[in-house]
Image (cartoon, grey):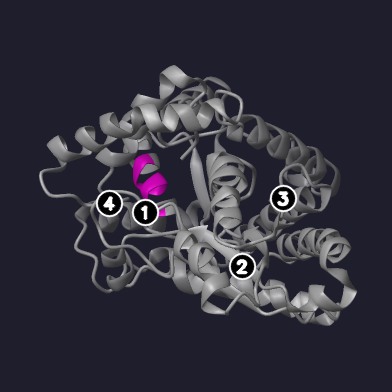
Amino acid sequence: MGGPRSLDDVNSYLNGIFADRDIMQLPVQDYLGPFIANRRTKKVQDEYKQIGGKSPIEDWTKIQGSKMVSILDKISPQTGPHKYYIGFRYNEPKTETALQQMKADGVNRAVAFSQYFQYSCSTTGSNLNELYRQVHDIDAGRQIKWSFIDRWGDNDQLIQVFANNIEKSLKVMAQKVGNDGVNNVPILFSAHSLPLYVVLKGDPYVAEVGATVGLVMKELRKRNVRNPYRLIWQSEVGPLKWLGPSTEHVIKTINASTNGKIDSVVMVPIAFGSDHIETLYELGIEYRNLASESGIVNYELVSPPNDDDIFAQGMAAEVVSHLAKCSSGSTNSLDNQIYMQCPGCVSEQCRITKKWISSHQNSNE
């Protein structure tokens, strides 16, 4: 999705989100979308002021991309030289900007590498729909041959990084509650929520986030981390019904509902690859303050991967594995998941995009 480069960009960024029917479908969306965006602009600007006046996601993405291609040039010189391009959905550098630069650079082979670990029609799906539209306009002659990494929530290095970072936070927590007490502190995996109707159509996001959580906990169990854990959902907005339990509700009630037995939590942003508004403000400030008001004495926020070298190695490994499958004539995506529409999907754009993706399958070497 990206994030605003300045406070002045916040309104256009929000309008882009609330106009996107892949993210949420509102009644009279042409009216209600801008209404919600405009109404929320001042509040969201105030939040960005508290984390530096802009989203850091572009900076982190550049760091991650640079590290990844540096590793790729070393471990896979036969597919190099490698270059990354950033294609955000709602702010520059947008998808069309990346495509125009790729055309100018003479690129003829590209991998669309989603930076969402887990697939949802509202995130990766929306971006792929936009990629199709822009390719149709900018590269109708198909100068660029595409393949697709649409989900990678089971990546070994990704799991390792989250487990490492959780262990670091548990060590900090142990200094506050003691080595015996730390084993009872719940690990709360918080992921961006979805409108409930998206899930009921068959969107795989919930299952894929749960799978990532399961793999992280499996790794932690190997390290003798025995803490209880739960998956909760943050960042709901607007009039729709969303997934539960919400992160806000859990933080508000977990102390009181256990008669004060739980007064410490470790929060894990399990669906985010870098710090941005949802981690720095929502989890780092808003929910931390709410926790303090709700009887939570100790609140530890686990860092997302950010510039972790192991994470960059995981990104590179994902690309190398993907390119090897393509060159061998194998399918582009594990289990052909990318080609299947959700059982309840009625989107003609989704069908067209998946047909376009399929058309590239046998054209890559």
Task: Give the residue at x 54% y 39%.
Answer: 277
Magenta part of the chain: 125-130
Residue that badge 3 annotates: 305
Which image quadrant for residue 151?
bottom right
Tell me the kind of residue under disc 4.
Met
Residue that badge 4 annotates: 24
Local SS, label 1: loop
96 vs 22: above or below: above
Task: Give the residue at x 28% y 55%.
Answer: 350
- Residue 127 part of the magenta-drawn span: yes
Q: Do the residues under discs 4 and 1 have CB atoms within 8 angstroms?
A: yes
Q: Do the residues under discs 4 and 2 have CB atoms within 8 angstroms?
A: no
- Estimate the spatial distance between the alpha carbons at disc 4 and disc 3, rounded to whole Å: 28 Å
> Considering only order in the chain, which callout, 3 or 2, is on the residue closer to the N terminus?
2
Tell me the kind of residue under disc 3.
Pro
Tell me the kind of residue under disc 2.
Leu
Residue 302 at what x, y percent from top left?
Answer: 71, 55
- Estimate the spatial distance between the alpha carbons at disc 3 and disc 1, rounded to whole Å: 22 Å
